[in-house]
Amino acid sequence: MPAVSFQSVTKTYNTPKGPFQALDGVSLDIEEGEFFGLLGPNGAGKTTLISILAGLTRATQGRVLARGHDVRIDPAQARRQLGIVPQELVFDPFFNVRETLRIQSGYFGVKNNDAWIDELLENLGLADKANANMRQLSGGMKRRVLVAQALVHKPPIIVLDEPTAGVDVELRQSLWQFVARLNRQGHTVLLTTHYLEEAEALCRRIAMLKSGRIVALDRTSELLRKGSGSVLHLRLDGVLPPALAARARVTGNMVQLPVRDAHDIESSLAALRAAGLQAQDVEIRRADLEDVFLHLMAAPAPLAPENIAV
Ligand SMILES: Nc1ncnc2c1ncn2[C@@H]1O[C@H](COP(=O)(O)OP(=O)(O)OP(=O)(O)O)[C@@H](O)[C@H]1O
């Protein structure tokens, strides 16, 4: 049985301008014990998908199961399987950190949970803040409490929606160490992130969403292998010829050009010379997940579900 199963999930929001389809037939199984990444640009539908899993939003069509429990038919059991770290910081300002975690424990019917609460506080660098009032904490500290809150009932499935947005390097590292440890202990992890290097380092499989559809779903290593091979990095004063500009990523005078092989490198440099341009600081690097991501996001239309390599 998969840890999470999204089955032909569709979501249409009613907006003042009329219906808006945020998800269009998303099907996806996440296996028990997987570290799974959900990537996509702003507005792709990631949070909508997670909100449906969390029971906060209703799918217009389709089914979502958490360890076999339908989030619509059996919401309490489904919710118990999940520890969800939301994107937004929402708290009751009247409690301190320990009280906040005890209340959350009680909500899930977990009693005498102080040993685990202490372990969470320790691992998330919150031990000295246990008695601090929530409103006294910095944004980064509040985010740590959100993570602790999500984990307080030792959920088999941990869902992290952009957990490292606006978080310092120290917390990022300790958070990932802790989540990786929980994953090794058997917890399933579903992560959405804009930090592609995090997804590349942590996730065994990745789904990429674009305009509410899955445009890629594969092992991270396969996505990297199928990606554009290598990338030619160079500095250029001048305007790229149109044929190269169509496939290049340009930031100021830095140009990144996906290349397949030595011949492609040679012909790209020759095209620059022919245009009277002098490339400087030329370097060839292995394509990373960001290159694959940008390549897929630049594609004109998302793939129909039946054309996706699984
Ligand atoms: N309650 C809502 N009513 C109407 N439209 C909505 C609502 N919530 C989300 N949307 C729209 O649905 C689309 C998907 O939004 P969603 O928040 O799921 O994207 P996302 O991939 O999580 O983006 P981000 O990376 O910015 O968080 C967006 O176009 C968004 O504007």
Image (spheres, rainbow, N blue to C red):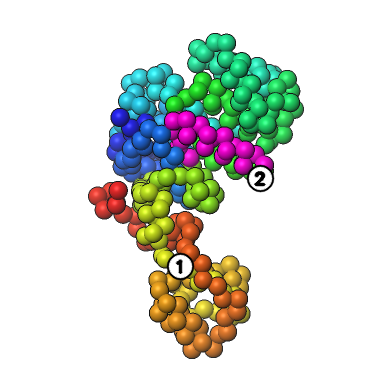
Circles 1 and 2 in contact, beta carbons < 8 Å: no
Could you tell me which residue is drawn at 55 percent across and 73 percent down?
A: 283
Could you tell me which residue is drawn at 54 percent across and 27 percent down?
A: 150
- 300 lies left or right of 126: left
Q: Quadrant of residue 52?
A: top left
Q: Quadrant of residue 297?
A: bottom left
Q: Residue furthest left?
A: 306
Give the residue at mark 1.
230
Between discs 1 and 2, the one toward the N terminus? 2
Give the residue at mark 2.
169
The location of residue 43, given as percent across then percent down, is 47, 47
Q: Is residue 176 magenta?
A: yes
In-front residue for pair 61/74? 74
In-front residue for pair 42/203? 203
Circle 2 residues within 10 Å: few <14, some 14–19, many ≥20: few
The N terminus, quarter of image: top left
Residue type, mark 1 in image = Ser
Q: Is residue 43 magenta?
A: no
SS at circle 2: helix
Q: CA distance from mark 1 to mark 2?
A: 28 Å
Could you tell me which residue is drawn at 55 percent across and 16 percent down?
A: 105
Residue type, mark 2 in image = Val
- The stretch of residues the image draws in magenta is 169-191
The location of residue 40, given as percent across then percent down, is 45, 49
Residue 272 lies, with reference to residue 219, above or below; the image says below
The location of residue 209, given as percent across then percent down, is 40, 48
